[in-house]
Amino acid sequence: MIKNRILSGVQPTGNLHLGNYLGAIKNFVALQQKFECYFMLADLHAITIFQDPQQLKNNVIETAAAFLACGIDPKKNIIFCQSAVPGHSELAWIFNCVARIGWLNRMTQFKEKAGSNKEKASVGLYSYPILMAADILLYKATHVPVGEDQKQHLELCRDIAIKFNNDFNCKDFFQLPEPVIVKEVARIMSLKDGKKKMSKSDDSEYSRINLTDTEDQIIQKIKKAKTDNDLIPSKVEDLNGRDEARNLIGILAILKNQTLEAALKDFSGKNFSEFKNILSDYLIKEIVPIGKKIKEFKKDPNNIKKILKDGAEKANIVSNQTLKDVHNILGLAL
């Protein structure tokens, strides 16, 4: 029985931002002290929406550089590209034959991403939760860091594992992974619209803090971040309906390792002009050094490629064993 193994990943689609960092990467850095970690650049997930091939290659290097700059240690963890491990795609196909159409039809995130054009969305965008299940179960991960918007996908992964185990009478072959959820402000929202998740695809640069932003850029973006005219309240429930205010206070709370309640206590009755200056200071202290390290790592792309190659070799060893066992269970490749 494997103990305490993490699998998680980030799509290498460029312009990693504060939401990626606080919602995922910063958590990865903490988790590497407690778990055996597999950190994946999810390039197969990225191509569910068209990617320029050369830009995708560049984004892989930049995302890997961000992992390293944020403190993920390649000597302690396995960092690799998803597409460099063929087992992800093969196990996803096998799970396509285990999962049910009705399960996928219940996935709310596809409806959100496809919007009114779901008939024109790629099959990959529809079925990528199955690939996500393969990512996790290929390494028999015991835990998966997920945001609130990914919990449904992890539940699907568990359903697939249960059905596979039952269908083929192989009790406990696939363990049921448990979620690791950051409770405080699981989603970092846009600086321009507190109802929308912070996104690298947003047309406005002022909607997000990029990990490569300079001190001046951070100050300007926070200064222009949308708020309201009311003072900062003392109670969390008083933030209901004040999405932008909740988002900014939540960001500072995470940066200070506080609860939302504690952050409100510090600023209760104050206006946002004073608050924004303090938030900018904390962001500069946290983000600017990371941006400088990203630029340094990117100066030596061959080193990054070597780290990813070494990681893929280690990941393939585990992947191949899982697939060999799956083949035996299914009666494949006699």
Image: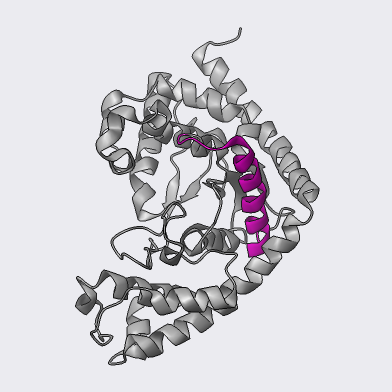
Query: Where residue 174 sits: x, y (%)?
Result: 48, 33
Span of residues in magenta: 48-72
Q: Residue furthest top?
A: 334
Task: Name the image quarter holding the N terminus.
Answer: top right
Could you say which is closer to the camera, residue 89 or residue 276? 276
Question: Position of 54 compared to 203: left or right?
Answer: right
Q: Main secondary structure of the magenta part?
A: helix
Q: Is residue 261 above or below residue 204?
A: below
Residue nearest the observer in this picture, 152 or 229:
229
Task: Please name whichever residue, 140 or 283, is drawn nearer the observer in this view of the structure.
Answer: 283
Image quadrant for the C terminus? top right
Residue 100 visible in the picture = yes
Q: How is the image coloured?
A: one colour
Foreground: 229 or 330?
Answer: 229
Who's the residue at 50% across and 37% down the image? 45
Residue 133, given in percent of the width and then of the height, sits at 45, 35
- Vertical arrangement, residue 322 with respect to residue 269, above or below: above
Residue 26 drawn above or below residue 279: above
Q: Please name the residue shown 59% across and 44% down the image.
A: 41
Is 80 inside the magenta-drawn segment?
no
Image location of residue 269, percent across then percent down: 27, 92
Q: Taking the image as drawn, is residue 258 in sight?
A: no
Q: Residue at x 40, y 63 (%)?
A: 188
Q: Image point 49% across, 67% down: which residue?
A: 209
